Image (cartoon, rainbow, N blue to C red):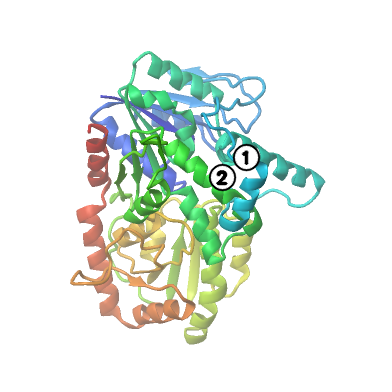
């Protein structure tokens, strides 16, 4: 089978974030059994050596310049093609039928009552000033008119679109997969009539943003409320283009079904196609996360994740500013290590607090997990199964996590063995962490049971096999 995989996130090395980890490990598994053609975008920190390494993993690799950067000369090397963008930068694809619905004011009124748009994944840039206000108004207007969120349009490569169009038109692939919902923009609605198209979306953008408003963790609630109905319309529209949708947890699936069903009936027919939604979780590379050799004991905590990602920033601040102070009152020598690439200023500032160290990107996260008595995953926003939780469990580091941090994982309740401790409120975290600090037997119980769960259900071979079966359905 010939599989065309589309990923605007460059997926190598598989240590930059959850999207890279999932995409790389799935393509690596599929490449052993099928011909995989990968189209991706080169981010500024990608090296030529990393491109060459990724090229060895697939049948064909096409790497396109980042549309957010000035155009660069095309590079041709060893069969690798880097395609030039248009002189104007990027051109969005033709709009799907429908355009705006109900005019400007109904959308605004509905937005004030219901919804919002998530902020960009990466923080940064200056705020304030007339030019920024104009920019925000322009982005909102464009979203209203096009039906596509600004972050999707800003990562769009016209050259990658042309390349994908040529492959599909020429019949050079049997299946097209979009590795993250942002890549849906490249898939034409008519493709579903001639080949299998799959959106591996990780989680619902509409559901995630709705949760941020409900939990009070939205940075800009007014903006988000204005955009929720637009996000709902966007997610309904793009889902209808695909043969199948893949989410990472049953919660993700339920959110999408809540949005997509029941669909409106027009003259006895659904107004849009509702594809089957499959659940395929994330996995762990056990060679990168070996089981710990000893229990270090002590009063050491760790939280790991990309530190320019909004849910991780929120979790790091919640852990450092609200959980650590009462914990340190009980254990004055308690320490926390924050591990993860690209820490933003808000995270770097946490390193000035007593007992907290910010180390940024590291070569092997497992080494830091092995040195910690407890891994805390205090996620308050963001749906989907968490790589960081699975990796800590694989490494044998006992986990204390929130409902969001444990989503999709059978770790407690019923007759099943305990594999992690659950906490959502500050005092619940303090008590759960203290119980692990004090009880070596409990630490060992969670460590062994968690590793066993990962080995039996969450290796990339197991997950890759599930994805492979779906693509041959």
Residue indicated by mark 1: 144
The answer to whether residue 289 shows anywhere in this view is: yes
Q: Residue placed at 27% from the left, 39% from the top? A: 467
Position of residue 257 in the picture relative to residue 110 (left or right) = left
Residue indicated by mark 2: 230
Q: Residues within 10 Å of mark 2 (few under 14, many from 20)?
A: many
Quadrant of the image occupied by residue 466: top left
**Is 135 drawn above or below residue 161 in the view shown?**
below
Query: Residue 167, percent across and down?
Result: 40, 18
Query: Residue 228, percent across and down?
Result: 56, 50
Position of residue 57 in the picture relative to residue 339 (left or right) = left
Q: Residue placed at 59% from the left, 34% from the top? A: 146
Q: Residue furthest front?
A: 267
Quadrant of the image occupied by residue 415: bottom left
The residue closer to the viewer here, 326 or 365, is: 326
Q: Residue placed at 52% from the left, 64% from the top? A: 214
């Amino acid at each position: 089978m010939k599989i065309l995989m589309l990923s605007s996130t460059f997926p190598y090395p598989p240590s930059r974030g959850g999207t890279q980890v999932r995409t790389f490990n799935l393509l690596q598994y599929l490449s052993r059994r099928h011909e995989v053609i990968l189209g991706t975008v080169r981010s500024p920190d990608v090296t030529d050596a990393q491109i060459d390494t990724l090229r060895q993993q697939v049948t064909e690799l096409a790497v396109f310049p980042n549309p957010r950067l000035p155009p660069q000369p095309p590079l041709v090397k060893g069969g690798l093609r880097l395609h030039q963008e248009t002189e104007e930068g990027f051109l969005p694809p033709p709009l799907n039928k429908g355009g705006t619905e109900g005019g400007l004011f109904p959308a605004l009124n509905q937005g004030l009552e219901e919804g919002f748009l998530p902020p960009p994944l990466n923080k940064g840039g200056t705020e304030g000033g007339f030019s920024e206000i104009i920019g925000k108004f322009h982005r909102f207007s464009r979203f209203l008119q096009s039906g596509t969120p600004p972050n999707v349009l800003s990562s769009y490569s016209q050259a990658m679109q042309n390349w994908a169009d040529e492959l599909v038109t020429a019949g050079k692939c049997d299946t097209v997969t979009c590795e993250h919902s942002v890549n849906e923009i490249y898939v034409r609605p008519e493709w579903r009539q001639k080949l299998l198209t799959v959106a591996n979306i990780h989680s619902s953008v509409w559901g995630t943003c709705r949760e941020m408003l409900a939990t009070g963790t939205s940075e800009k609630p007014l903006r988000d409320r204005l955009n929720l109905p637009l996000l709902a319309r966007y997610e309904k529209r793009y889902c209808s283009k695909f043969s199948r949708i893949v989410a990472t947890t049953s919660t993700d699936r339920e959110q999408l079904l809540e949005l997509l069903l029941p669909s409106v009936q027009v003259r006895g027919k659904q107004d849009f196609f509702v594809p089957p939604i499959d659940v395929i979780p994330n996995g762990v590379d056990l060679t990168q996360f070996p089981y710990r050799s000893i229990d270090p004991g002590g009063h050491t905590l760790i939280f790991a994740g990309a530190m320019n990602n909004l849910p991780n920033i929120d979790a790091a601040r919640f852990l450092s500013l609200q959980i650590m102070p009462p914990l340190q009152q009980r254990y004055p020598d308690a320490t926390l290590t924050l591990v993860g690439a690209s820490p933003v200023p808000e995270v770097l500032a946490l390193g000035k607090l007593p007992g907290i160290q910010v180390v940024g990107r590291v070569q092997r996260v497992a080494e830091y997990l092995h040195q910690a008595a407890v891994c805390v995953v205090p996620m308050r926003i963001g749906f989907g199964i968490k790589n960081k939780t699975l990796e800590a469990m694989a490494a044998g580091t006992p986990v204390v996590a929130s409902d969001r941090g444990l989503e999709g994982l059978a770790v407690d309740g019923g007759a099943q063995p305990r594999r992690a401790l659950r906490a959502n409120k500050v005092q619940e975290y303090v008590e759960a962490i203290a119980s692990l600090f004090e009880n070596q037997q409990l630490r060992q119980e969670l460590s062994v049971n968690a590793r066993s769960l990962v080995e039996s259900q969450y290796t990339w071979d197991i997950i890759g096999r599930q994805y492979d079966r779906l693509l041959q359905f």
